[in-house]
């Protein structure tokens, strides 16, 4: 008999420019990919591919953009940077944790945003930075 996958378990993604391999742990304590790049108290994961693509495209660094499939090793909570502050509820299904995420796969094929969309997003982030609005809340 064939195993039936539990469809109630969400798939979580982590968009980045870090070069990781299967089994690696993504842990807090490294410089954040966003904002002032201070040491991150939390790490972030997301359950929508669209938001994971933005995460990869906006991540700091020169390495290629990557989207990993990750598995939380501890509790996760709604991402306060998006939930109810910018977007009511949690439609992006963005979460954070102080526990590591285990890399269990990588998406090799996904469609990037159009260059104009990416430029508009980066310009908006730059405007917020000029206004002193920090992207990441710890």
Image (cartoon, grey):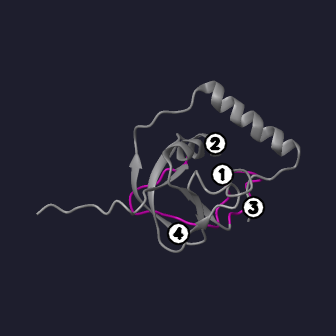
Q: Is residue 20 magenta?
A: yes
Q: CA distance from mark 4 to mark 1?
A: 16 Å
Give 87 or 70, whichever is nearer the viewer: 87
Q: Specify the segment rendered in magenta.
A: 16-40
In percent of width and height, residue 67 lies at 48, 47
Q: Residue furthest front?
A: 88
**Which of the two labelled residues, at mark 3 and mark 2, occupies the earlier sequence position?**
2
Which mark's residue is nearer the viewer, 3 or 2? 3
Q: Is residue 72 above or below residue 68?
A: below
Q: In this rendering, is residue 73 above or below 44? A: below
Classify residue 13 as left or right of residue 134: left
| N-term-proximal mark, 1 vs 3 | 1
Query: Going 64% across and 29% down the picture, which residue do you hit?
Result: 117
Question: Which residue matches tag 2?
Answer: 58
Numbered mark located on residue 100 in the image: 4
- Of badges 4 and 3, the one in the foreground is 3
N-terminal of the pair, mark 2 or mark 1, is: 1
Q: Nearer the viewer, residue 119 or 51?
A: 51
Q: Residue furthest right?
A: 131
Q: Is residue 21 left or right of residue 64?
A: left
Residue tagged by mark 3?
137
Quarter of the image with the C terminus is: bottom right
Can you give x and y, in whole percent of width and height, for residue 6 in the image?
31, 63
Residue at image position (53%, 41%) is 65
The span from disc 4 to disc 2 (Cα, nearest Å) is 21 Å
């Amino acid at each position: 008999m064939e195993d039936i996958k539990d469809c109630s378990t969400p798939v979580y993604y982590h968009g980045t420019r870090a070069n990781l391999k299967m089994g690696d742990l993504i842990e807090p304590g490294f410089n954040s990919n966003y904002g002032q790049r201070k040491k991150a108290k939390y790490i972030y994961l997301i359950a929508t591919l669209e938001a994971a693509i933005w995460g990869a495209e906006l991540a700091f660094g020169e390495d290629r953009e990557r989207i990993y499939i990750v598995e939380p090793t501890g509790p996760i909570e709604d991402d306060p940077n998006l939930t109810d502050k910018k977007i009511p509820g949690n439609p992006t299904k963005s979460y954070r944790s102080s526990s590591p995420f285990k890399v269990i796969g990588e998406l090799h094929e996904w469609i990037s945003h159009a260059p104009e969309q990416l430029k508009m997003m980066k310009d908006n982030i730059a405007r917020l930075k000029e206004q002193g609005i920090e992207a990441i809340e710890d």
